[in-house]
Image (cartoon, rainbow, N blue to C red):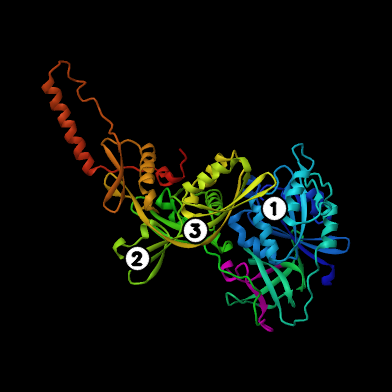
Amino acid sequence: MNPEKIRNFCIIAHIDHGKSTLADRMMEITGTVEKREMKAQLLDSMDLEREKGITIKLAPVTMNWKGYMLNLIDTPGHVDFSYEVSRSLQAVEAAVLVVDATQGIQAQTLANVYLAIEQNLEIIPVINKIDLPAADVEKVSAEIINLLGCKKEDIIGVSAKTGLNVEKVLDEIIEKAPAPKSTDKTETRALIFDSYFDDYRGVVLYVRIFDGQIPKNSEIHMMANNTNGLALEVGALKPKMSPRGELTSGEIGYIVTNLKTTREAKVGDTVTLTKTPATTPLPGYRNVLPFVYAGFFPVSNDQYKDLKEAIEKLSLSDSALRFEPENSPILGFGLRIGFLGLLHMDIIKERLEREFKLDLIVTNPSTNYQVILNNGEEIDIKSAADLPDISEVKEIREPWVKGEIILPSSMIGNVLGLINEKRGHQTNLSYIEDRAVIDFEAPMANLLTDFYDQLKSATSGYASFNYELSGYKAEDLVRLDFLVAGTRMDALSIMCHKSEADHIGREITKKLKEVIPRQNFEVALQAAVGARILARETIGAYRKDVTVKIHTGDRDRKAKLLEKQKRGKARMKRFGKIDIPPDAFTVMLKRD
């Protein structure tokens, strides 16, 4: 198609501001999907996306409106998938910024706007949910003008649910969004902005063609990964696959390949033809590395093989997923899995339990640490149990993040206190109308467990939070171990700052005391750094009344029976085995 008649755009917004609903109305109005086939959140194909009301996997769709081809990419809003969002933004020329009229600008709105500005996109501001009684269009308009520096008449007020003014948004895209730049290059270059594994067809790539064209059955080459494949089918998504003879410059579409895993064609890679290969790839590709790790163990060891097969299947379509075998004396065989963030971890856990019917024990999430040894060697550890002997360690570096919190101005004090509590520090404080934006830095490990919950509690649910990894810093870190009846439990060990070890040790031993059931003998729970015990809790033994059969008040006979019981308890303590329930391994996530 003539590139002058093509418009490529995406929709960016905070979670639950209505971008998937706006995409639904656009498809309905342009006749891309018939009304009888229409359902809410049509592009959110996973059950989990519908339940949680969030977009997890981005989805492109091609629409025709007034003689123009409109290519839309519905992007995820969550910070865990920000790399996917940045690649999607590189594949388009314009972004529709959707802001909820009842909530205003939130943290991920800002984060995604900054990404769009970095890519020099034309931003079309839209205020959604203007038909709700709580909508404050004037206030939200002032926030958008303050953020983008646009005029009030540039902002379109819509109701994505009813379809009010959605046609105006489509017309504005045609008028304001730039057409793809036409190039005279004979070499072919296409950007992969998403890929997934189809059980029947192999790896399917979602691509934007920047130069040249990709015909059906042509041989293709992935430049960053240095892998070759075959374009078995090419076409557009409407939103179902609609095959064509070829994809040409400026278009967005799909390529069905003969590849066996998405690791061979990662997001951000450049596709070219093997006959006329490109010399320089498109910019911006990087390998996405996980920085949240957790141990996944089946409740029954019989399910270990099923767990491994399930994770291998999921990793075919999720190139960010990393896993390796792990063995624990208590939990048996399992896998240590790396994720992009806590939401990513929750989604994978739920998919394993639902789709593969697995009963899982998930250990406390941790992050990765860089350990510098005395001989200068640098190693990466993914759990505290992997830390070498402390006498061999020169320094330990932990990942830090740059965070951004948007909240009502009256609640700043509570949040600054929470940031300090997490060993973080504020770097900047600015204001958007009656709300404040706090920029801060903090260690990743301290934000993993319940920071988001505590933030919501401190601000009555009004704050929104966004973060990105900023780098690694050397800190005074120690390995905190937990002993149950004198036995060290590696699966419970954590890395923490030396100044926090006492407090965390006391807190976790108290929580373990609530979770681990009483035994027939006394059980000591201890927190230790090296050989130094920091905290102790004791689970009292069950005590049978052995004197009940004595009807006289003979003290000697009672003492003799109690002494016999005491000896029995001592023997039990030496040989007794403690049953540790699965709850004990997620005790860090347990709220007080």
Q: Report the side of 404 relative to 393 (left or right).
A: right
- Look at 27% across and 33% down and name the residue there: 541
Mark 3 / mark 1, whichever is N-terminal: 1
Residue 581: x percent and y percent? Answer: 39, 42
Which comes sooner in the sequence, label 1 or label 2?
Answer: 1
Which residue in the rendered view is the most extreme toward the top? 552
Q: Do the residues labelled 3 and 2 touch (CB within 8 Å)?
A: no
Work out whether residue 497 or residue 81 is closer to the camera in this orientation and state it. 497
Q: What stretch is highlighted in magenta?
A: 254-278
Quarter of the view holding residue 316? bottom right
Q: Residue 394 carries which label?
A: 2
**Residue assigned mark 1:** 13
Q: What element carries label 3?
A: strand
Local crowd size for mark 3, using a 10 Å CA cut-off: few (<14), some (14–19), many (≥20): many
Q: Is residue 197 visible?
A: no
| Residue 156 - label | none
- Left-right relation of 358 to 68: left
Which amino acid type is shown beneath numbered disc 3? Trp
Residue 297 in view, yes or no: yes
Mark 1 and mark 2: Cα distance apart in space: 44 Å
**Marks 1, 2: nearer the viewer:** 2
